[in-house]
Amino acid sequence: MQDPKLTTSTSTSFPTPRGGASLILSFRLEHKTTLILGADSLAASRAFAALEANSSVLVLSSGGANRACSEVRWRAEQGQLSVVDLDTLPGSSIPKDSSDRDSEAVEYFLDSNGFTGSNVTFACITDTVLGSLCRRTPSSAERIYKIFKSRGILVNTTDMPGLCDFTFTSMHRFESADSRGTTPLQVGVTTNGQGCRLAGKIRREIVARLPREVGTAVEMIGKMRSLAKEENGDLNQEGSPIEEGDSFDESGITTPNHPVPARTHSETAAESARRRMRWVAQISEYWPISKLAKLEEREMRQVLAGTQFSAGNGDLEFPPSVHSLDVRPPGGRGRILLVGSGPGHPSLLTLATHTALTKLANLVLSDKLVPDAVLALIPKDVEVRIARKFPGNAEGAQTEMMEAAIEAARRGLTVVRLKQGDPVVYGRAGEEVLYFRERGFEPIVIPGVSSALAGPTFAGIPVTQRGVAESFMVCTGVGRKGKEVQLPGHERGRTLVILMGVARLVQVIGALLETYPSMSSSEDGERRRTGAAYPAHLPIAVIERASMPDQRVIESTLENVIRALESVGEQRPPGIIIVGWSVLALWAKGDVEVLSEGAEADDAKRVKRWLGGEGSPDWRVREGLDEGWEGL
């Protein structure tokens, strides 16, 4: 649990609601009824959307099916919906030019003994389209709107925003990649009434940029989630259904990388179920969509069981690769290349890495953090396997990949062991070099651009800066087998870069801060910091998905960063932590006088200026890359 002492700031820190947005929800409408007033082409569109959501549909229209558009009439003939003629209901004797005419008929219909109005969840008034020759008057629409509202029915009135409780998004439902029909995946876009045609265009742009198999990937993950809950009766420790959101630790840190104990044979049924759901979240987060779309049940079960893929003869047998192609040995002695892929942006690959991936590799064994954009460069005739290095299973997955590399090299293949960043910066390259050497293969290590340096640069943070940071130190937030590590003490002119520490942010901050000495030691009493404590107002940045289009930078101070990270919602691994004055050195007009004599007296003011002045929030969130990176 978070130490309450860590939340010491009294200033406004959380985002201020700006209004004007919609609460976008998705509804299951089975055993519910959607009522549509009108029978034009728009009514047909609303009816189709409701039918797709398994809702019953009732269409009320003057003249009934005879005056309905061809689609509404056809669906009525097919028994997909029902059409009721308003003119046949009580109230029709009222003169046609009266605004009370249809409202009384609608009210009678809802309250009649032959109909249970409580089943109606949504009502759509479609005969109010601007420009229509038979457009319903605003006064009539308002009367009908009030009738629906008095019965707790939500209403959408076309082209009358003041009579709308909800609006429709411009929606696309994805088809299966193999044309088996529709998938559970839907994408909707709303402009909140400011441009329906533009919303449709934006929706088309989004859909066009998503892989064709994205819907099938959703289906496969849904199947895997069901398998994950199948073994133990779908129950957690309290006897409630386990959902993917339950897979995270009770601290509320919404990241699939949150530390968990290594898997043991003595884990309870609930622990086993939670572990499997964590692994589903891991696969959803890290595996390419093309790989997810090709998942087979055998592979799903093996992943969830945390076992190696055994062919029964001592050799490792992997499931279909990203490209699902067989690799034939080229003959001769194989070799192993340990390759760094950089922080993620494909343009930061070295020429040597690009050559290894595109011209030399017969088999690529990739870490899970390597993004799709890099994997997409690999030719389609090269087999790609992704490490199953999930929380609680890291050691076994590491061994599995090393064994696979040896097995393939012995068959004469050129194996590229692909790692994020630089392979020797917390990439376990040393372990693999010794492992391969012992088995007769001397690997070639190809350096990569380290995330420890590139990540801060993408966020506009220099790890060294004259007048601010004379040195920097890179360390890890987690030791071998998940154990805690000692962090270095504070030096004013040094930048601290922490890799693999975001999921353990509470422990990291507790170890750094002077004000909370009880948190600077681990449970067994071992000190987690060597040297001086860090001041609570010291700037810190958490950089997520560095160099990728969805990069996010959360900037705050040590005393407020935990609340800052909690406020932004779901985390985006991988993440890097930067601690020190270099975080604010190049912001706006810059501040490069941190190491000047007597500068410490102005620290509180420089932090306030950096965060926006008095009364500003205690943190800042920046999304995306600078525009200049487009096309590079």
Image (cartoon, rainbow, N blue to C red):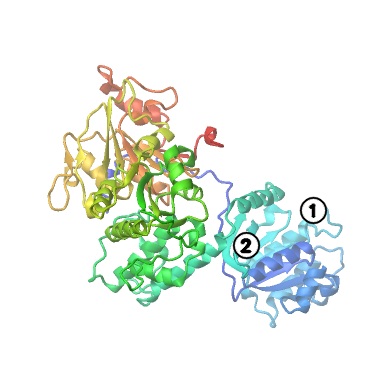
Query: Residue tagged by mark 1?
Result: 130
Q: Is residue 423 above or below residue 93?
A: above
Q: Which tag is nearer the camera, tag 2 or tag 1? A: 2
Choose top left, top right, bottom left or bottom right for residue 463: top left
Picture disc at residue 99? none
* Residue at horizontal 45 percent and vertical 72 percent from the top: 297
Element marked by disc 2: strand
Residue 624 horizontal side relative to residue 12, left or right = right
Choose top left, top right, bottom left or bottom right for residue 457: top left
| Amino acid type at image mark 2 | Arg
**Residue 266 visible somewhere in the drawing:** yes
Query: Residue tagged by mark 2?
Result: 173
* Residue at horizontal 36 percent and vertical 71 percent from the top: 311
Spatial separation of the CA atoms under disc 2 and disc 1:
28 Å
Element marked by disc 1: loop
Asked whether the residues under the numbered discs 2 and 1 touch, taking CB atoms below 8 Å apart as contact, a structural biologist would say: no
Q: Earlier in the sequence, mark 2 or mark 1?
A: 1
Q: How dense is the environment of label 2, judged by Cα within 10 Å: few (below 14), some, or many (20 and up)?
A: some
Residue 229 horizontal side relative to residue 117, left or right = left
* Residue at horizontal 39 percent and vertical 58 percent from the top: 282
Among all residues in the image, which is located at the extreme top?
597
Q: How dense is the environment of label 1, judged by Cα within 10 Å: few (below 14), some, or many (20 and up)?
A: few
Residue 579 horizontal side relative to residue 22, left or right = left
Query: Where in the figure is residue 235, as x and y percent of width and height?
Result: 36, 74
Q: Nearer the viewer, residue 187 or 168?
A: 187
Q: Nearer the viewer, residue 327 or 397?
A: 327
Quadrant that contains the N terminus = bottom left
